[in-house]
Image (cartoon, rainbow, N blue to C red):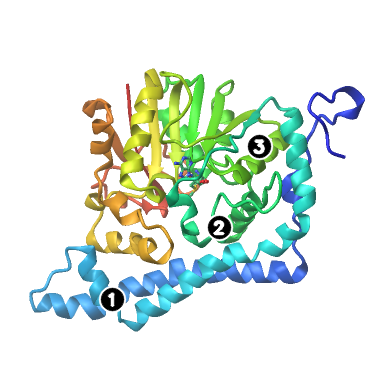
Amino acid sequence: MTIQAGMTGANAPDTIPDIEALAVATHDEIGRQRFCSALRRHAIQDMAGTLEHDFRERVARPAEAKGMHFDDWRMIDRAMEGEASYRFYSSVRYNAQEMCFLSVQPQVERALPAMIEVARDAAALSPAGGSLRLDPALAPPRYVDALDVHLMPGCFHSEYAEDDVAQGAVASLGSRVFTANQSHRSWGGVAKVISRWLKTDHPGFAPRRMLDIGTSSGKNLLPYAEAFPGVEAHGVDVSAPLLRYGHALAEHEGVALHFSQQNAEALDYPDGHFDLIVSSFFFHEIPVKAARRVLAECRRLLAPGGMIVHQELPSSHLVDAYEDYFWNWDTLNNNEPAYTAWRAEDHRALCIEAGFDPAATFALILPDTGAFPARGTAFAWDEPGRPMHGRGGWYVFGSKI
Ligand SMILES: C[S@@+](CC[C@H](N)C(=O)[O-])C[C@H]1O[C@@H](n2cnc3c(N)ncnc32)[C@H](O)[C@@H]1O
């Protein structure tokens, strides 16, 4: 049954089914997905460790003995490009990445009509009190529709059917394979880390209205609604299938989230509308000139006393040459062409350029709640044992007014 807007009483359910549970994988598909998870973990952890060891011991040590110093990631890139350790690691990593998303497509295709119906019902009823505002006239920016970002076939925005949610499902389920099968509910680690830090470091701070930029399906928006009860939680993204899917998930969870299809470079909210603006895994996927416009929008939209906290990849100047080299793999191999240019920027300087107070602008590594449960405050850059971004820590930058 498709529920019509305004349907009430006995005809209208007060809960929305779990859209994600509709895409059931077969036995063989589960086997393939487990293989993809294991292969990716092997590439990103075991093989990455071997690669670093090979570089430091076999390539760098003899070269340094002759007076050569690898103090720039490009030098390391050039030295490793033809090495078997790099070529094998890179090939396995590339294919594992792509296969994570490919491996969920069959189950999404089978369940698609039912999933679309659930998302339509969620949009018509919003029993949890959230909302979905779509703009069919909005064209995705070139940096979204020109290539399949991080090798997800169809990227974020593609639509194959009316009211399509397929890319929402592929992104969500594919990311479960990518992260070794964490459910949508168990995600949101970055949001949990940032909200814990906000509560520890800024105990008086209680946002009334917040915005998550590039929210996708809101997995890093939902935990804020729980961490700050009563906050009016908004998420924007250019990609309608992700927003439809995220809205259906949130309504199923009984959490009121307000999703809107907009380009974050020019948002339609009034000045000073939010007192917390966040993002996660967003800025490195857009060109630096677009990032400048988004940060200017953040400044315009922030109310006095408000904060911006963006989780990202650490700036080049904050890491050593090898870590820099390791992160920049995605630029050429993972369809993320803005990655190196974004990381080359000083993100605090970009905030200041957007009008934020230099004294209030920060860049930190926040401890992951799973890896450091007892530690809510940030790590210093020179602190012994500081975890790398993504390995027990999350890099964030931001400011307040
Ligand atoms: C890697 S995903 C972000 C994931 C999400 N924040 C999370 O934590 O799971 C990047 C998202 O940004 C969206 N996006 C890219 N450019 C955008 C823009 N100019 N305005 C709004 N959303 C954008 C994409 O559609 C995509 O959903």
First in residue order: circle 3 vs circle 2: 2
| 30 and 303: which is toward the camera | 303
Q: Which label belongs to residue 247?
A: 3
Q: Which of the 4 quarters of the picture holds residue 290?
A: top left
Q: Residues within 10 Å of mark 3 (few under 14, many from 20)?
A: many
- Tell me the SS state at disc 1: helix
Q: Quadrant of residue 4?
A: top right
> Could you tell me which residue is drawn at 61 percent across and 34 percent down?
134
Mark 1 surroundings: few (<14), some (14-19) or many (≥20) residues within 10 A:
some
Depth check: give the residue in front, 249 or 162: 162
Task: Examine the rendered structure and indicate whether residue 164 appears above or below residue 108.
Answer: above
**Residue position for label 2:** 179
Q: CA distance from mark 3 to mark 1?
A: 45 Å
* Mark closer to the chain start, 1 or 2: 1
- Image quarter where the C terminus lies is top left
Say whether residue 154 is left or right of residue 332. right
Q: CA distance from mark 1 to mark 2?
A: 27 Å
Q: Is mark 1 within 8 Å of ligand 1?
A: no
Nearer the observer, disc 1 or disc 2?
A: 1
Q: Assess whether mark 2 and mark 1 are in contact (beta carbons under 8 angstroms).
A: no
Q: Which residue is mark 1?
A: 80
- Across and down, in percent, residue 326 comes to 33, 63
Residue type for callout 1: Met
Tell me: is circle 3 under 8 Å from ligand 1: no
